[in-house]
Image (cartoon, grey):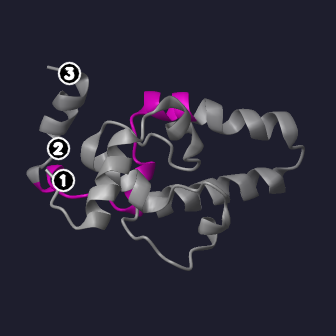
Amino acid sequence: MSPRSRVEKGKPEAWQDQAPFGMEAEYAHPLETLILGTGFFIGIMLFCDHVILLWAWVTVRLLETIDVHSGYDIPLNPLNLIPFYAGSRHHDFHHMNFIGNYASTFTWWDRIFGTDTQFVAYTEKMKSGKKTE
């Protein structure tokens, strides 16, 4: 049994079947926090020299994390002004499928590595009105 399935089996059943909400995205295993947090802070530690910039960066990243995990595709969302921003529709497919759509902010990474092919096929089926599997 994988460590993840052991954790999932240990959760109350009410938690297992519900979709995550925005703030729940901040709940992660300490190792995941360490690995992802390292990449998160490298840029800020190298290029910023003031604590206000650190707080601004943390705030923007937290808002982005909440947005992509909210489940809502808000049309007037200011984050949609960021070129290639993924948003919740793109990232929700990742949580639905667990294969592909790994980029929560910039979709070009999924295009470059070909990890968005199932998402592209899914959106084409949805546009044409066909039922998906």
Task: Report how far apart the C-alphas of labels 2 and 3 lie in the structure.
Answer: 15 Å
Q: Residue 45 falls in which quadrant of the image?
A: top right
User: In this rendering, would 100 be left or right of 61?
Assistant: left
Identify the mark nearer the N-term, 3 or 1.
Answer: 3
Q: Looking at the figure, which quarter contains the N terminus?
A: top left
Residue 99 forms part of the magenta stretch: no
| x and y percentages locating residue 129 in the rendered image | 22, 67
Image position, residue 88 (x, y; %) = 43, 60
Q: Which residue position is annotated with label 3?
A: 2
Camera-side residue: 44 or 108?
A: 108
The answer to whether the residue labelled 2 contacts the one labelled 1, judged by CB atoms less than 8 Å apart, is yes
Q: Is residue 50 above or below residue 28?
A: below
Which SS does the magenta portion mostly show? helix
Amino acid residing under circle 3: Ser
Mark 2 vs 3: CB contact within 8 A: no
In this picture, which residue range is highlighted in magenta? 14-36
- Residue drawn at 45 percent across, 39 percent down: 102
The residue beneath circle 2 is 11
* Residue at the outermost left position: 13
Q: Mark number for residue 15?
A: 1
Question: Please, what is the three-letter code of the amino acid marked with disc 2?
Answer: Lys
- Relative to 120, is 130 above or below? below
Percent across and percent down for residue 69 are 41, 58
The answer to whether any part of residue 26 appears in the image is yes
**Residue at 9 percent of width and 50 percent of height:** 13
User: Type of residue at label 1?
Assistant: Trp
State the residue at coordinates (67%, 61%). Answer: 82
Query: In 3D space, how far apart are the residues under numbered discs 3 and 1 (Cα atoms)?
Result: 19 Å
Magenta span includes 21? yes
